[in-house]
Image (cartoon, rainbow, N blue to C red):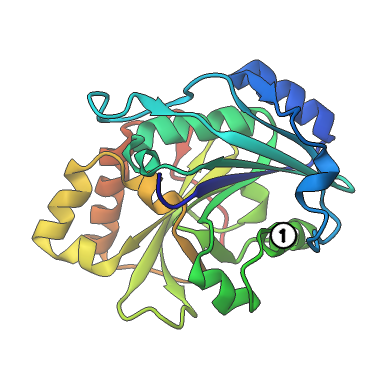
Amino acid sequence: MGDCYDVVAVFERPWKEVVDELDRQFGLVKDTEHGLDEWYEHYDTRGFKLVFKGKTKNIILKTIRPERYVGVGFWIEVFSKSEITIVDFGTCTSKFWDVSSKELVEFFEKLTNAGAVIITGYVYGSERFEEIFGEWDQFLVYEWLEKALKHEKLEILPSGVTVVKDNLLPIEDGLYELVEIPWMEEKEYVLIKSLDGYKILVSVWGSDLTYEDSYRELLEDKAWFSQDMTAVIFGRIGKRVKDEFLVKRAEEYFKAQVGEVSGESDKGQTR
């Protein structure tokens, strides 16, 4: 046991359709011990109604250390509000950090094939949430994601690895600065890559690209995305980086994590 790690997928389709699709993809077991209304009856849910609670039947994400942990399954909460469905995949075990980046990207692809338009993550109880929202509350995160959809534009990176429908991020692929993060003591960047109608955003510290030992670790450890997936960032995407050395290293880092990904493109739209 340990901290709880959550992957949040946002859909613009009815919740019943989403649950049926997730059941086909992963196999779900419904929680029947408690009524749905009991779980959050004392919370301000910002209009999000819990409509399904359960877990995956089997392990759905394999780790890079099968001798220690074979893989990870999730408990699942599905919330509905108007035309939006939020699916929160949670696990309270540090073995999530042992899930390979490639395995995680394949998981993203299953969610986008099911219609997810935003995929992000968080660690339960993160202090960063209190800095941003004034308190820790998962429903404030859901509300923030809802507003991003309504504005049809994602200008802020919510977590260290984020996936969005490409119309929500109409900028060219490349390496960008992250700005407006009060606690940031060094440069942090985000690499943006196009993948089959979506963009995957991956954050990386400047020192990890410039210090040789740190950079070697980026290339050798194949589970960085799962560690960064739930890192709460909420940094604004700033200027595009033109330093060829940094761009090349960021691209090499991405390729080392996931290899050649289907649908990858170097084309994008102008910022």
Q: Residue at x 67, y 22 (%)?
A: 29
Q: Residue at x 57, y 70 (%)?
A: 129
Q: Residue at x 49, y 63 (%)?
A: 232
Q: Is residue 191 left or right of residue 22?
A: left
Above/below status of 257 relative to 127? above
Q: Nearer the viewer, residue 243 or 114?
A: 114
Q: Residue furthest left?
A: 213
Residue 235 locus on image (x, y percent) = 50, 71
Q: Can the viewer see residue 84?
A: no
Above/below status of 57 relative to 139? above
Q: Which residue is mark 1?
A: 139
Q: Quadrant of residue 71?
A: top left
Residue 8 locus on image (x, y percent) = 61, 46
Residue 128 locus on image (x, y percent) = 51, 71
Above/below status of 103 relative to 156? above
Q: Nearer the viewer, residue 230 or 29?
A: 29
Q: Quadrant of residue 165?
A: top right
How packed mark 1 is, by other alpha carbons closer than 10 Å (few <14, some 14-19, many 20 or more), is some
**Which element type, helix, strand or loop, lies under badge 1?**
helix
Q: Can the viewer see residue 190?
A: yes
Amino acid carrying label 1: it is: Phe
Q: Is residue 12 left or right of residue 170?
A: right
Residue 64 locus on image (x, y percent) = 27, 30
Quadrant of the drawing holding the C terminus: bottom right
Q: Nearer the viewer, residue 127 or 256?
A: 127
Above/below status of 215 relative to 58? below
Q: Residue furthest front?
A: 33
Q: Residue at x 71, y 29 (%)?
A: 31
